[in-house]
Amino acid sequence: MRQIDTLLHAKWIIPVQPDQVTLENHSLAVHNGRIVDLLPRQESTAQYQADTVVTLDSHALIPGLINAHTHAAMTLLRGLADDIPLMAWLEGHIWPAESRWVNEEFVQCGTQLAMAEMLRGGVTCFNDMYYFPDVVARTAIAAGMRACVGLIVVDFPTNWANDPEEYISKGLAVHDQYRGDPLVRTAFAPHAPYTVSDQPLKRIGILADELEVPIHIHLHETADEVEQAVTQTGMRPLERLNKLGLLSPALLAVHMTQLTSKDIEIFGASGAHLVHCPESNMKLASGFCPVQKLEQAGILVALGTDGAASNNDLDLFGEMRTAALLAKAISNDASAVPAHRVLRMATLHGAIALGIGEETGSLEPGKWADITAVRMDDVETQPVYHPISQLVYATGREHVTDVWIAGRQLLKERQLTTLDVQDILHKTRDWQARIADSDLIQH
């Protein structure tokens, strides 16, 4: 009998890979942070002796969810300005607030608040785009959470850097500092085609290729963005990025609500990936991402929440349900983006898009034990005929009870084990008081 760290028994295990598989009364064996076996419960007790045994007879175990697009620290700006179009929201409220308030302390507190929310919602990895990425990285590591940290670049000065050259230089230093870290990866994060000029984008493309890291960018988010790009450059943003050499399997394009058939063809041929943020897109009236058409073109689609300032939550269970329902409404096809597909978008597709698909995103032997346990015996989730459909269409993040990252339990029976909730709330209220006293609040 083999000695291991942890043995998890569950009513259902949904590994995501292979697709559409639900295993009843199975167990996960975990050792040294990784999954070593997935097998029927009766066999597991005969083969393994574990230091810790957890029995979850009313739960489904799924891979930890991957939030493929966040601005984590912007949780401190949640509700600052609502019901406003994107550019008015950015230029009139968000950018002025960031200019005044964003510093290392702001980013640390906002990221801790975001991680607490995400962990309680079953998210084990987030792909971030924000200032002070070094602070985001060390804050994630301190909490034991997996993160892809965005090396932000914009043309204008902020509290993080003054010009594209300094953004890139500081970003490279962050990349070097966390290279090889088991929890933190990096990605270049030019904000958008309308905030980053040609020369920085070209350099980012070259560096991303040399360092083998992704490029994370907002793209074709609104009709106004595309129209202005055509007026100013004579090209659609996607065409411009293609000309600059950025369209490749390293690219993660976020939003993509304004797409022609030619856009989809060009994007699909490049091997680039897309991050769908349905609720943020709807709230800002940005448009609808044609997910079914993208998938039919062979494009990998991951799922993100965007920041809490424009969503206004970091609830990936909500995004899964919205993504599935919205795809059906847009395509007038009830079979579009079924439950198993949207669960894959929120797990394995996110991992593949971030370049960590061999390490996480599914419950397979050899991968990190990034696991979310979801209780399925509540009034809202009974009866259960098809566990995967139930997870997407009836289950909420409040049903997440336990979360493990690399075999370490970060959420135990709804209680966070590495983050002090009361301390986070105290600091959050302090930030709220400071910001509320300014003249930046929407009236």
Image (spheres, rainbow, N blue to C red):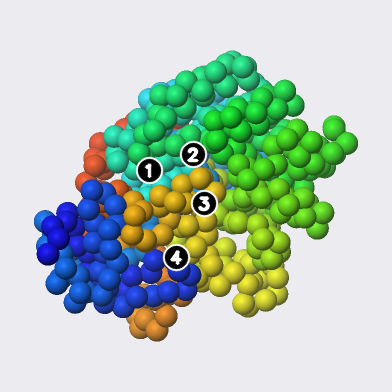
Q: Residue at x 51, y 51 (%)?
A: 352
Q: Residue at x 69, y 37 (%)?
A: 246
Q: Secondary structure at mark 1?
A: strand
Q: In the displayed structure, would residue 166 be above or below residue 376?
A: above
Pointer 4: what residue?
A: 17
Towards the viewer: 286 or 55:
55
Please tell me which of labels 2 and 4 falls first in the chain: 4
Pointer 1: what residue?
A: 146
Crowd class of label 1 (few under 14; some 14 to 19; many from 20; radius 10 Å): many
Towards the viewer: 98 or 294:
294
Please tell me which of labels 1 and 2 falls first in the chain: 2
Give percent across and percent down for residue 55. 18, 68
Q: Nearer the viewer, mark 2 or mark 4?
A: 4
Give percent across and percent down for residue 269. 73, 52
| Tag shown at residue 352 | 3
Q: How far apart in space, not on screen, are marks 3 and 1 (Cα)?
A: 14 Å
Q: In the displayed structure, would residue 372 be above or below residue 19?
A: above
Q: Quadrant of residue 328?
A: bottom right
Q: Nearer the viewer, mark 3 or mark 1?
A: 3
Q: Secondary structure at mark 4?
A: loop
Q: Are marks 2 and 4 in contact (CB under 8 Å)?
A: no
Amino acid type of the residue that numbered disc 1 sits on in the rendered structure: Arg
Q: How far apart in space, not on screen, are marks 4 and 3 (Cα)?
A: 12 Å
Please tell me which of labels 4 and 1 falls first in the chain: 4
Amino acid type of the residue that numbered disc 2 sits on in the rendered structure: Asp
